[in-house]
Amino acid sequence: AQTVTQSQPEMSVQEAETVTLSCTYDTSENNYYLFWYKQPPSRQMILVIRQEAYKQQNATENRFSVNFQKAAKSFSLKISDSQLGDTAMYFCAFILIQGAQKLVFGQGTRLTINP
Amino acid sequence: ETGVTQSPTHLIKTRGQQVTLRCSSQSGHNTVSWYQQALGQGPQFIFQYYREEENGRGNFPPRFSGLQFPNYSSELNVNAMELDDSALYLCASSLVSGLPTDTQYFGPGTRLTVL
């Protein structure tokens, strides 16, 4: 079975702080991509960052970076200098390269940035 | 915004009825995927269409069906609705071009309530 686990249902930090969201996943396949998606309240789900499993270098996108540990099947998201607009549900997901492009999502982490 | 639109925004139906949800993909995208997101959960893959044919299906019964049209639009049909079908239904479009795993762009969703 392919699963994604996000162990932090909710997190809250002050504006400008750094926060790390955890994600672990399980698959027997070796070739896949990993994603973090952001779903603001009543707004569309948008891609935050993506990581190819065959790349050892961790992906970064401005204030967003990941810590990808393939052997541990861990894929955490770090948000630096957090902003009020970062308040949202964050979903970790992966997709296998072979077959239908089916995203497998975790349960999500509700992140609140406080002023 | 992602360029993916969905209609209607909200819908209320009665158990046993049928419903059709619509999605308009980004121009040029040849693949559309549909997801069901129950309240407080991550999205679950329903099925995917590639060039107007079903290209993969999740663990959903046959009363969930779909269509994809040449003009980048698609439909999700649900027959004999049950109370548990109440959820946010998301469509996501992507351009599958033979390269590994292209990014999926999500629409804002249709909130379906079954009474």
Image (cartoon, rainbow, N blue to C red):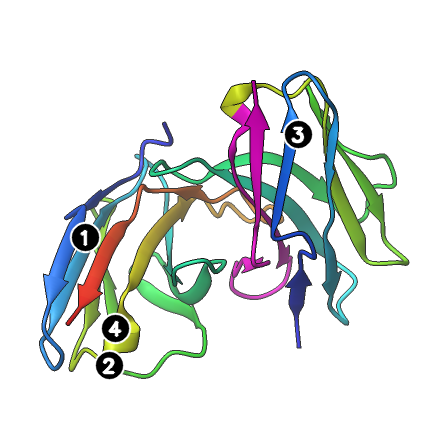
Tag 4 secondary structure: strand
Dividing the image into 4 quarters, which one contains the N terminus of chain B?
A: top left
Q: Are dots 3 and 4 on a single chain?
A: no
Look at the image and tell me whether residue A71 can be seen. Answer: yes
Using the numbered discs, state the Cα–Cα distance from disc 3 to disc 4 in whole angstroms: 42 Å
The answer, for residue B75, to whether it is visible in the render is no
Residue A96 part of the magenta segment: yes
What is the three-letter code of the residue carrying label 2?
Answer: Arg
Task: Look at the image and give the residue range highlighted in magenta.
Answer: A86-115
Is the same chain shared between marks 3 and 1? no
Callout 1 amino acid? Arg
Q: Residue B50 location in percent, x, y?
A: 38, 58
SS state under label 3? strand
Distance between the alpha carbons at the discs numbered 3 and 2: 44 Å
Answer with mark 1 or mark 4, whichever residue precedes in sequence. Answer: 1
**Res. B65 mark:** 4
Q: Quadrant of residue B27?
A: top left
For mark 2, name the chain: B
Q: Secondary structure at mark 2?
A: loop
User: Tag on residue B22?
Assistant: 1
